[in-house]
Image (tube, grey):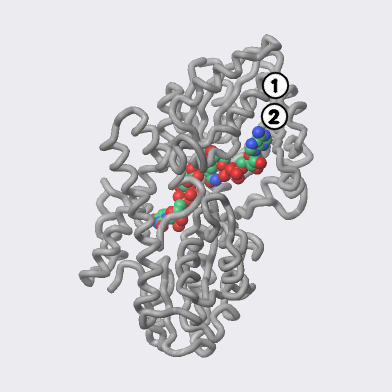
Amino acid sequence: MDSPIKICCIGAGYVGGPTMAMIAKQCPDVEVHVVDLNQSRIDQWNSDELPIYEPGLDEVVREARGRNLTFSSRIEAAIQHANMIFIAVNTPTKSFGIGVGRAANLEFIEKCARQIAECSTGHKIVVEKSTLPVRTAEAVKRILNSSANGATFDVLSNPEFLAEGTAVQDLLYPDRVLIGGESQEAINRLAQVYGRWIPKDRILTTNLWSSELSKLAANAFLAQRVSSINAISALCEATGADVDEVAKAIGTDSRIGPKFLKSSVGFGGSCFQKDILNLVYLCENFGLHEVAQYWEQVVIMNDYQKRRFSERIVSTMFNTVSDKKIAIWGFAFKKDTNDTRESAAIHVCHNLLEERARLVIYDPRVHESKIRSDLKMAFSDVNGVLSDKHKQLIETNVTVVQDAYVAAKEAHAIAVLTEWDEFKQVDAKRVFDGMRRPAFIFDGRNIVDRSKLTQQGFEVHCIGRS
Ligand code: NAD
Ligand code: UGA
């Protein structure tokens, strides 16, 4: 009989935390130990205020924590005890050296592999959960095989497809779970874990390289759809077509499908841009320049969309926003998350601050300290240095408030940058009465009721509508 599965997960972030909490919830007899170098993150996982906001996550964690789910910074002990080790650490875009701005920084992955090699004995399955360039498993295997203690390893690729804001639902009912590997026995062991709550036909198995590449390809295809509809939105604005009507018309074609056709101020999030740039770098490495250029265009279009939105605000407001108050509704990269990584809001706020606008920012989940540090980062140079001039600009021109109505008070304009449900339900009269005239709304998510707001007296500007 197989020995009981004992799991360690290195990395208690947006992926490691929720994924392991779900495994622990669904498999009460499997010990799950999530470890991280960042002690304050671990402390938050052990507190009542989790480090990440995800609908339904509190309940999942509460059910399993203290039973078979542990969060700690005892990395070595957790590795030694486990027979299945997930690596879910960050793989950001390189900010230095060869491949700067494109290649994935694999420093954290390599450190994990070395640490596993150093403190393991016996046989262990090592699972790549992080998103990685194709053939990373080869390097991971070589490092693991250098283990001085005679430990042996199987390496699997098991990329994560959850989206933030819907992580719990995505983990409970995934479209598929992908497991790539060489050893059928190791694949079966991992499939056995997921098989506790996921139907067998949704657990796909492939070779290692297909699994690693499928993750990058899936994100590239999803981001490409957003850039495609955003490209069409620019044409809609020029021609009088309505992008939501066009999206509906094309999305009803069953070959195209309706999802991921919502035009916006631009996609954000920690992964789309990072993973596409990684794909572009890989293609270039293999001499596939046309393929690299093809995918890079998805990111170029996204940058254009963010810039276009900011420019539209300035040109509509009589070509100047200097000293005008603009309410920013939403700072997270999408609703139902407190994550701001690569949020379009950061870019739009940066552009408006360069035009000397006064911003009053409200987001229901993002802390003021995070908003300020993101803006400081956006104004910093390549070495991370923030000039006194920019520091002063952020201090004097940015206010963060806790209420959408307060943000809009005395404002010349509102920019909706995240599609939080509460922005759809605001009392239009109350907002309008508090604002200056003309009262502009720039809807970067196409969520407000345009005709109702226009009737109220607002001048409403949406994406993809002239
Ligand atoms: P994250 O930054 O939220 O978390 C990563 C954690 O790993 C951090 O807490 C960090 O302290 C920890 N860490 C780094 N090196 C470590 C080490 N040597 N030992 C112990 N801990 C270490 O990142 P994330 O958003 O969870 O993403 C992790 C990976 O999953 C990335 O490759 C990402 O592309 C991929 N991914 C992310 C999402 C998402 O929704 N965020 C979805 C699918 C896949
Ligand atoms: C995305 C993928 O959807 C996940 O499958 C993947 O696991 C994850 O990346 C990852 O690898 O990190 P996520 O970035 O969390 O998930 O969220 P999405 O729902 O994909 O949204 C990404 C961005 O695109 C958001 O800014 C969102 O507002 C924008 N978007 C999405 C649009 O502008 N229009 C759409 O129609 C859909």
Q: Which residue occupies 52% across, 30% down?
A: 158
Residue 111 occupies quadrant: top right
Assess mark 2: CB under 8 A from ligand 1? no
Considering every residue shown, the one lying at the far front of the view is: 388
Task: Determine if residue 173 is in view.
Answer: no
Residue 258: x, y in percent? 33, 54
Give the quadrant of residue 450: bottom left
Q: Mark 1 falls on what kind of element?
A: loop
Q: Is residue 409 above or below residue 73?
A: below
Q: Nearer the viewer, residue 398 or 2?
A: 398
Query: Which quadrant holds the C terminus?
Result: bottom left
Residue at which label 1 appears: 4
Please give the residue where the numbered disc 2 appears in the rendered image. 30
Total number of numbered discs in the rendering: 2
**Circle 2 SS class:** loop
Residue at image x 44%, y 46%?
272
106 lies above or below 309: above
Task: From the viewer's perspective, tell me whether residue 30 is left or right of residue 388.
Answer: right
Disc 2 and disc 1 in contact, CB within 8 angstroms: yes
Name the kind of residue labelled 1 in the image.
Answer: Pro
Circle 1 residues within 10 Å: few <14, some 14–19, many ≥20: few
Lateral position of residue 196 relative to residue 120, left or right:
left
